[in-house]
Image (spheres, helix red, strand yellow):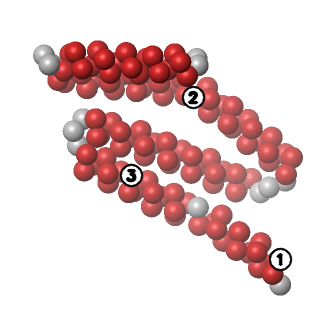
Amino acid sequence: MGIIQIAMIGIGAVALALMVKQQKSEYALYLSLSAVVLILVFSMNRLQVVMETIRKIEQYTGIDVAMLKILVKLMGITYVAEFASGICKDAGYGAVGTQIEIFGKLSVLAVSMPLLLALIETLQVFLS
């Protein structure tokens, strides 16, 4: 499914949610949540393409598999944190959404430390 179709699903869900929100605000939340889940399902196809490309990069470059796994984890952390934060903010719990974003950023920083150490070691070899 292309970006046009996904955009139409999102815009349609928001338009319906705005109309429903005046009568039953909880139904508007359910409607937007189901649109988000539907778009997430369609996003999984794109994730397969990314994973296949990462495997090809690994084969061509000989980069350590652990480093590529870290990159995949970083993508997952950012996506999940953004997803959960957006849902919380849409539901009116902006403070919770902001805390999820902060935790996501700290998680990215923590998971990326081995990459930073590998980069520093590589630079040390070139500078020595």
Q: Which residue sits at x=42%, y=26%?
A: 37
Few, some or many residues within 10 Å of mark 2 (<14, 14–19, 20+): few
Label whose residue precedes the other's in the sequence (1 or 2): 2
Give the side of residue 95 with respect to residue 50, left or right: left
Q: Which residue is mark 3?
A: 101
Front residue of 3/33: it is: 3
Disc number at residue 23? none
Q: Regarding mark 3 in the picture, which secondary structure is present there?
A: helix
Give the side of residue 68 with respect to residue 40, left or right: right
- Using the image, determine if residue 76 lies above or below residue 25: below
Instruction: Please state, as top left, top right, bottom left or bottom right, where the C terminus lies in the image.
Output: bottom right
Residue 47 pos. (x, y %): 62, 33
Distance of mark 1 from mark 3, alpha carbons? 36 Å
Residue 2, quarter of the rendered image? top right
Label whose residue precedes the other's in the sequence (3 or 2): 2
Q: Regarding mark 2 in the picture, which secondary structure is present there?
A: helix
Label whose residue precedes the other's in the sequence (1 or 3): 3
Q: Which residue sits at x=42%, y=43%?
A: 82
Disc number at residue 44? 2
- Using the image, determine if residue 113 lies above or below residue 127: above
Q: Is residue 27 visible in the rendered structure shown here?
A: no
Q: Is residue 99 visible in the rendered structure shown here?
A: yes
Q: Which residue sits at x=32%, y=21%?
A: 14
Query: Farthest bottom residue?
Result: 128
Amino acid beneath label 1: Phe
Disc number at residue 126? 1
Q: Are marks 3 and 2 in contact (CB under 8 Å)?
A: no
Few, some or many residues within 10 Å of mark 1 (<14, 14–19, 20+): few
Residue 13 pos. (x, y %): 35, 18
Distance of mark 3 from mark 2, alpha carbons? 22 Å
Front residue of 26/6: it is: 6
